[in-house]
Image (cartoon, rainbow, N blue to C red):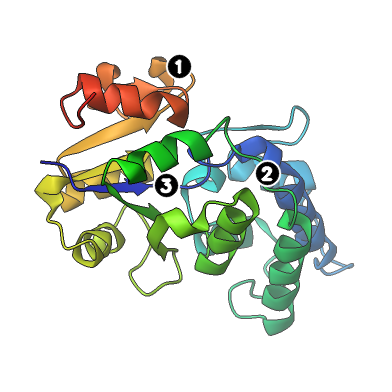
């Protein structure tokens, strides 16, 4: 019997492009501004964005790219490798980290865009007796802000981010902690996600099944993700769980 449903956030609950594209553009702009003025071969915004799977010209975000599936720490490391050798250390420079946090807070606040109607199916699942959690590679505070803005934070316990002490996906510790908080075991848990990091966490934690949110089944993050488990929106999730035998109709 399935007791626990664990959800990724961006691309599953949130519209990834609508919510985050303006933010990642601003982060790239601020980062390139910190390059030494006398450095040769200055890196452009488009180059930084492309390195993490974001197309600056079209505004598209690759669901398999690092921005969609990774953590800010991984993004910083990728950008650091592209920047001039005498550039500040993005991981350890206190002023840089503080300004990035401020930009994320300022630009994301009030700009949380859901991926369709998410409140209705999530409340239906909670009313059916499932325990719900969020497991994201975003920070915990940012995730909670997003959920508050959508009016659904109260449906989830716990909300675990990459900075919550369990590491980021695809490592399984955060997913296993969700199980522990729900007093369920992995065999009673489903992971709902859209990236290889989500699927990797599900496989490593050995949960019962993985549900993929993808506009097209061909965009699922791994060939082992079952096509019949792919849906474009959370609004389709309750009916899918009924079809798969995880929920009563």
Of the residues tagged 1 and 3, which is closer to the observer? Answer: 3
Q: Which of marks 2 and 1 is nearer the N terminus?
A: 2
Residue 186 drawn at (x, y percent): 14, 51
Tell me the SS state at disc 3. loop
Q: Distance between the residues labelled 1 and 3?
A: 18 Å
Labels 3 & 2 near each other (Cβ < 8 A): no
Extreme residue in the front direction: 127
Tell me the SS state at disc 2. helix
Label number found at residue 19: 2
Label number found at residue 216: 1
Residue 109 drawn at (x, y percent): 73, 58
Above or below residue 213? Residue 54 is below
Q: Which of marks 3 and 2 is nearer the N terminus?
A: 3
Above or below residue 182? Residue 131 is above
Confirm whether residue 43 shows in the render: yes
Above or below residue 218? Residue 8 is below
Q: Mark 3 points at which residue?
A: 8
Disc 1 packing (10 Å; few <14; some 14–19; many ≥20): few
Q: Quadrant of the C terminus?
A: top left
Labels 1 & 3 near each other (Cβ < 8 A): no
Q: Choose top left, top right, bottom left or bottom right for residue 241.
A: top left
Q: Residue at (78%, 63%) from the top-left corner?
A: 106
Q: Quadrant of the N terminus?
A: top left
Extreme residue in the right direction: 37
**Left or right, 121 with reference to 138:** left
């Amino acid at each position: 019997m399935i007791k626990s449903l664990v959800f990724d956030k961006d691309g599953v609950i949130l519209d990834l492009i609508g919510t985050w594209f303006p933010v990642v553009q601003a982060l790239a702009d601020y980062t390139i501004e910190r390059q030494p003025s006398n450095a040769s071969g200055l890196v452009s915004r488009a180059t930084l964005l492309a390195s993490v799977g974001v197309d600056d010209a079209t505004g598209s975000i690759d669901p398999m790219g690092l921005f969609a599936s990774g953590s800010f720490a991984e993004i910083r490391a990728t950008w650091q490798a592209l920047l001039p050798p005498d550039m500040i250390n993005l991981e350890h420079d206190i002023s840089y980290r503080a300004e990035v946090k401020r930009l994320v807070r300022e630009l994301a606040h009030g700009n949380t865009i859901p991926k369709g109607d998410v409140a209705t199916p999530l409340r239906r699942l909670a009313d059916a007796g499932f325990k719900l959690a969020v497991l994201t590679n975003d920070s915990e505070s940012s995730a909670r802000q997003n959920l508050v803005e959508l009016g659904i934070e109260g449906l989830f316990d716990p909300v675990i981010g990459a900075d919550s002490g369990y590491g980021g996906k695809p490592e399984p510790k955060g997913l296993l902690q969700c199980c522990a908080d729900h007093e369920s075991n992995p065999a009673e848990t489903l992971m709902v996600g859209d990236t290889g990091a989500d699927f990797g966490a599900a496989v490593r934690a050995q949960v019962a099944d993985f549900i993929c949110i993808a506009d097209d089944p061909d965009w699922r993050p791994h060939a082992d993700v079952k096509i019949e488990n792919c849906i474009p929106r959370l609004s389709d999730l309750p009916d899918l769980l009924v079809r798969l035998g995880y929920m009563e109709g």
